[in-house]
Amino acid sequence: MKTLSPVSFLWQPFSPGRRTETLTGYALILPALIGFSLFYALPLFRAFELSFTDWNMLRAPRFIGFDNYIQMWHDGRFWNGMKLSLYYVLLNIPLQTALGLFLAVAMDRLTRSIVVRSVILLPYLLSNVLVALIWLWMLDPLLGIVNSMITSLGFERHAFLGSPSEALATIAGINIWRHMGLVAILFLAGLQNIPRYLYEAAIIEGASEWQMFRHITLPLLRPVMVFVLVTSVTGSFQIFDTVAVTTAGDPYDSTNVIVHYIIQNAFSFYKMGYASAMSMALCLVMVLYTLIQMRMMRASESDLA
Amino acid sequence: MSHLFARLNWFCIICWLILAVILVITVTPLWIMLKTALMPSSEVFNYSTSWWPNNPTLVNFERVLGLLSTEESLKAGGSGAKVNFSLAMLNSIIFTGIIVIIQTASAAAAAYAFARLRFPGRSVLFGLFVASMMIPGVVTFIPNFILIRDLGWLNTMMGMVAPFCLMQGFSVFFLRQFFLALPKELEEAAYIEGASHFYIFYRIAIPLSITPLITIATLIGINMWNEFLWPYLVAKDEAHQVLTVALQGFKSQTPQGQPDWTGLMAATAISVLPTIGLLLIFGRNVVESIQFSGSK
C-alpha cells in the first residue's frame, strides 16, 4: 500500500493502532460489502450460471451447455434488439447533447435565475413512466394535440408511436425532452468553471462568438462532456421504461430494444436461462464500451489545470 | 458579466430565443396534462385539441382518487378503474425514504474507510465497487428476482428496497472523492488526542461533508422516486404498488379500447405534485446538487 493515510506518521506494522484501524475499516465497509456481495457479485455469478441452463422457474434448471448462446447467435430478434438499442443511442444522444450544450451556453450568458434552472430541470425530475404517459396522450394519432397542430399547419397526420418507422425516433424525442435540461445543468456547472478572463482576452483580440465557442468553451468543457457522454450513452443503450409504457416493443418489434426483449423473455415467456444468456451479452457490450471510454477519458484530462 | 458581452447584442437575442423556445417546450406538455385533467371526459372527442378547458371540472380528480362511487364514476366517463393514490404515494415515500437513509449512511461509512483507513484488500474491494457501476441493471435483476422470490419477499417492502439499500457504486465513489479532499489536519489532531477512528469519522468527517451528503441523498432520492422496473417486477399487488407501477397499471385498464385519458391525466397531475412541491421548497438545493454531481 503506497497511499498515505492521515495517520501514516503514527502507523507501524503490527501495532495495536493498526489493528483497530483495520477492524474499523472492515466494520465501516461491512454494510456496503453485504449489499455488494448479495445483490451485485452473487447475482452476476448466478446469471452466468443460469445462462447455461433451460429454466422456466417451475421445474429444476436443466444444464444445456452453450445452447442458449447458440440460439442467441441465430435469433433474429436478439440482433434486432441490439441494433435498435444502438439506433436509439444514435437518435437520442447527439441531439440531446447538442441541445443541452446550447441551452447551457445561453443560460450561462443570460441568467443565473434559480427559477429558470428549476423549470429546465423539471422534466428530469418526473419519472419515465409519467413522462411517457403525458406524451402518449399528446401524440395520440386521433386526439393528440401534436397531430392537431401538424394538421392545422397543413401537414399529414402522423401515427408516431403506432408507426413502425416513427416509433423509435418518437421515443428518442420523448427522452430528449426529459433529459435535455439535465444535460444543460451539468454543462452549466462546467461553463461556470471557465475563467472569464479567457473570453475577455478573446474579445480584445477580436474573436468571433463562434471562435470563442470552438476554441475556449468546447476544449475546456471536455471533462464534463466525457462524464455526460459516458453516463448518458450507457443509460440510453439500456432504454426500457419508456418503451414498456408507450409501445411494449410494438409495432412489429420496431421498438423491441434489447433490455425490453430480455425482460420479455424472462418475465413473459419464462425463459430465465435464455434471458440470462442475453443479459451476459449486454453486460459484455457495456463493459467494453465503458473501458474504451475510460481509456479515452484518461487521455483527455482537463486543460484547466 | 453582462457588460462584458454588451457588444454582442445579436448573440444575446439568439440566446434569449433559444431559452424562451426551450422553456415553452418544457412547460407545454405539463399544461396539456393539466388542461386534460380539468376537462369533462365527454369532451375528449370534440375538444381534445383546444388549449383551454371549456368547462373546467374536478370530477376526474375525484374519481381517480376514489371519492365517487363506481356508478358516478362510470357516468363521468371513466372506466370505473381507480388508483389508490394515497397508498401508492405513501408506498413511494416509504420506498424512497428507506433507501435514501440507509444507502447514504452505508455509502458514507464505506467511502470514509476507502478514503482514510488502511486495511488489507482495500484497493481490490474499492475497484470491485467501482466496477459494479458497469453492470447493467437487467443482468442482476433476473437473479435478484429469484432470490427475493425464494426468500418469500415478493410483494413486500423488504423485497422492494433490498437490492438498492446497502450499496450503489456511484454513491461510494462520489463520497470517497470528497473525503479524500478534506484537509487531514483535524483528523490527525483528533487522533493524537486519542479519538478512535470511528469517532473521527462520525464526529469530524461527517459534519464537514454535509453538502456532498445532501447531494448524494438528493440524487438517490430522485432515482428511487422514479424507479419503475424493479418495483414492477417484485411488487405488483395493489397494497405495495409505488406510484410509477400504479400509473402503468391504471393505463392498462382500458375496457373501452381507448385509455381513459382525462382520468389518466388527472392521475398523472396528482403524481407530479410532490415533485413540484420539492422544487418549490428545495429548488436551489436540488439544482445545485445535480450541478455538483457532474463536477466530481
Image (cartoon, helix red, strand yellow):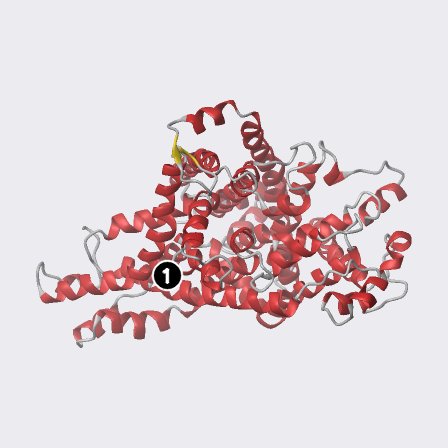
Residue closest to the eye, A5 or A189: A5
Residue closest to the eye, B51 or B259: B259
Q: Is residue B109 left or right of residue A176?
A: left
- Give residue A82's quadrant in the image: top right
Q: Is residue B88 above or below residue A211?
A: below
Seen from this angle, which residue lies furthest top?
Answer: A74
How many residues crowd mark 1 within 10 Å: few (<14), some (14–19), many (20+)? many
Look at the image and tell me in which quarter the C terminus of chain B lies.
Answer: bottom left
Q: Is residue A38 left or right of residue B75?
A: left
- Find residue A109 and report its horizontal and vertical position in percent: 63, 55
Subunit under mark 1? B
Q: Is residue A206 left or right of residue B27?
A: left
Q: Is residue A238 above or below residue B122?
A: above
Label 1: element kind = helix
Q: Amino acid at mark 1?
A: Ala
- Find residue B292 and report its horizontal and vertical position in percent: 48, 59
- Asked if one can make out residue A207 in the rendered structure from this viewpoint, the answer is no
Residue closest to the eye, A171 or B86: B86
Look at the image and tell me in which quarter the N terminus of chain B lies.
Answer: bottom right
- Asked if one can make out residue A28 in the rendered structure from this viewpoint, the answer is yes
Residue closest to the eye, B275 or B88: B88
At x 72% / y 40%, what residue is drawn? A161
Seen from this angle, which residue lies furthest bottom?
Answer: B193
Mark 1 lies on residue: B107
- Give residue A22's quadrant in the image: bottom left
